[in-house]
Amino acid sequence: MGFGWQELLIILVIVALIFGTKKLRGIGTDLGGAVKGFKDSVTSGEADSTESNSAEKTADSAEEQSTDAKKESAE
């Protein structure tokens, strides 16, 4: 029991009459900007976590090398 195209059209006309086309256009613009910002933050968050993981691995390997060098010089 879903909505058909006729019911959706009636609902759209009622919403347009209540809010007006300018207000709906503003809501659509704001909603689109919010979705774009969310997508950008998710993709940049994944890139940041990948970069931080590779930086941590590099730092860990550098620490291991310095520890190995200290052990060799102590022997």
Image (cartoon, rainbow, N blue to C red):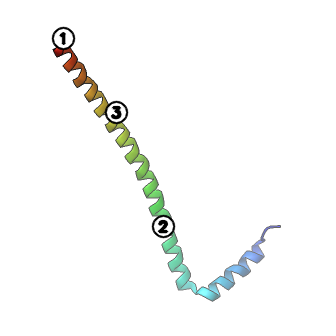
Front residue of this view, candidates 1 and 64: 64
Question: What residue sits 24% from the left and 23% below the top?
Answer: 67
- Give x and y (percent) for residue 32: 50, 68
Q: Quadrant of the N terminus?
A: bottom right
Residue 51, label in figure = none
Amino acid type of the residue that numbered disc 1 sits on in the rendered structure: Glu
Front residue of this view, candidates 64 and 47: 64
Q: Which residue is mark 1?
A: 75
- Give x and y (percent) for residue 54: 35, 37
Residue 34, label in figure = 2
- CB under 8 Å between discs 1 and 3: no
Q: Residue furthest left?
A: 73
- Mark 1 secondary-structure assignment: loop
Front residue of this view, candidates 61 and 31: 61
Q: Which residue is mark 3?
A: 57
Question: What residue sits 17% from the left and 15% below the top?
Answer: 74
> 10 Å neighbourhood of mark 1: few (<14), some, or many (≥20)?
few
Amino acid type of the residue that numbered disc 3 sits on in the rendered structure: Lys
- Give x and y (percent) for residue 62: 26, 29
Question: What residue sits 46% from the left and 54% below the top?
Answer: 42
14 lies above or below 69:
below
Question: What residue sits 31% from the left and 31% below the top?
Answer: 60
Amino acid type of the residue that numbered disc 2 sits on in the rendered structure: Ala
Q: Residue furthest right?
A: 1
Mark 1 or 3 closer to N-term?
A: 3
